[in-house]
Image (cartoon, rainbow, N blue to C red):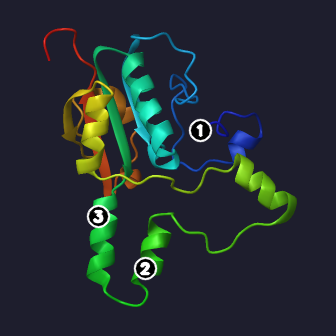
Amino acid sequence: MRFERLPIVGGIYTKNTTRFPANVEYGDIVKGLPVSAGTCCAIYCSHVLEHLSLSDCKTALHNTQKLLRPGGIFRLVMPDLEYLARQYLAQATPQAAHDFMTNAHLGQTTRSRGLTGALVAWLGNASHLWMWDYQSLVPELTAAGFRGIRRASFGDSTDALFGDVEERGRWDNCLGVECRAPDGMAD
């Protein structure tokens, strides 16, 4: 999304088939966003958390929960480790490990060298650093203070705001989760 908003380049480069609405904000959730705590009614995270280290992901979840106002919704989608592992085990062929590593974006088929390689390593964030399934993510969301944690599917949120940013293809065979910040009452 950062590149989408750049003059000239943004019109050419986009990973998403649809552009994000102008009212959508972005930033580094690990370092902190320029948004006051407790002010967001909804936060959407699509294919981001798997690009963070375990420690950074935990920080991001805590930071996200702090940004939400009481009862605010956090909705996320990411690759589903359980789905990928089941596909790997079911394949049972010499190609299975290769396909798993490729589909999970965990392996590197080649390593960029020289200045280009250094720039890609420094600026790039294409590799998945930590993979999640529902069973492993729920305790982390709970530790970050989220409540009402449930599996989510494309378009099933009670808040219509998410319809502006969700893209069906990003949910295929993936793990979707919706949860809420505590509402301030006994949760």
Residue reaching furthest to the bottom? 94
- The N terminus - image quarter: top right
Query: In the rendered structure, which amino acid carries the disc numbered 1?
Result: Met
Circle 1: element type: loop
In primary-sequence order, the first of circles 2 and 1 is 1
- For discs 2 and 3, the disc positioned in front in the rendered view: 2
Looking at the image, which residue is at 85% across and 63% down? 114
Query: In the rendered structure, which amino acid carries the disc numbered 2?
Result: Ala
x%, y% of residue 101? 47, 71
Give the alpha-carbon distance from disc 2 to disc 3, as whole Å: 14 Å
Query: In the rendered structure, which amino acid carries the disc numbered 3?
Result: Tyr
Give the alpha-carbon distance from disc 3 to disc 1, as whole Å: 27 Å
45 left or right of 34 in image = left
Looking at the image, which residue is at 72% across and 47% down? 123
Residue of label 2: 97
Residue of label 3: 83
- The C terminus - image quarter: top left
Looking at the image, which residue is at 50% across and 37% down? 56
Which quadrant holds residue 4?
Answer: top right
Q: Residues within 10 Å of mark 1 (few under 14, many from 20)?
A: some
In-front residue for pair 13/108? 108
